[in-house]
Image: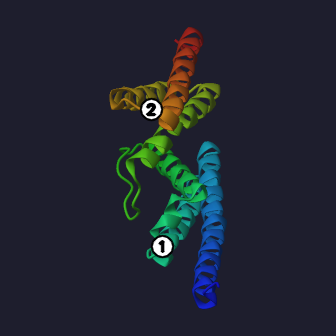
Amino acid sequence: MLDKKFFQEVRKELLNYAQKRRDVIKFAGDAQFLSKKTIFSLQAGSLNEAKKTLSEAKKILMELNKKFKATADLFDEGSFKAALEEFVEASLFMSFVENKSLTKIKDLKIDSDIYIGGLCDVPGEILRFAIKAATERNFTEVKRCYSAAEEIINELVDMNLTGYNRQKFDQAKQSLNRLQQVVYEVSLKFE
């Protein structure tokens, strides 16, 4: 009754896809961990360590893109998208720390939704960076943090974000509000 040969082919295809999916989940998780480690290193003032871990994360993501190019639907996996978003956040935060422009990330194909999701997380990292600067009595850096976060929010506000990115945008605005409070409190003490 059943075409055994056909069902063997279907089974083989599904098992092959499942193995590829497990690989993507595992390696995307590694890239996400390295991106988080990059952010932690940047917050701790370890720029060289941050550059190293970000480079490792990028290498993993590029290898995944190359290895599974023929199975593009694997890149719709939540773990891969989360790793890319964390990588975007780490890359953009590093650009901020190095006082460089926040711009397109080269060598990786990153769709707009993922890029915006990562960008929305940057004001939160900038807030933490500003608090550290405030404790070090570096008011110039606190002001730079506020200006950068404000510029990000001003750019995002015109994008009419919805769904997931709208929630992330709302969190970014909360970080900006908290940064404004830090600037205010620091100005009372140091100026």
Q: Quadrant of residue 100?
A: top left
Q: Position of residue 170 (x, y in %)?
A: 52, 26
Q: Quadrant of residue 23?
A: bottom right
Left or right of residue 173: residue 161: left
| Disc 2, SS | loop
**Mark closest to the chain's N terminus, 1 or 2:** 1
Give the residue at mark 1.
Answer: 71
Q: Give how far apart the Cα atoms at labels 1 and 2 are.
A: 29 Å
Image position of 108 (left or right of 58): left
Which amino acid is tagged 1?
Thr
- Mark 2, other Cα within 10 Å: few <14 / some 14–19 / many ≥20: few
Residue toward you, 88 or 135: 88
Residue 42 vertical placement versus 169 (above, below): below
In the image, residue 107 sits, relative to residue 42, either above or below, namely: below
Identity of the residue drawn at 63% across and 51% down:
36
Q: Is residue 120 above or below residue 158?
A: below
* x, y percent for residue 46: 61, 51
Give the residue pinned by disc 2.
162
Does residue 29 appear to the left or right of 100 in the view shown? Answer: right
Task: Tell me if I can see residue 160 in this picture.
Answer: yes
Of helix, strand and loop, which one carries label 1? Answer: loop
Q: Is residue 188 above or below residue 150?
A: above
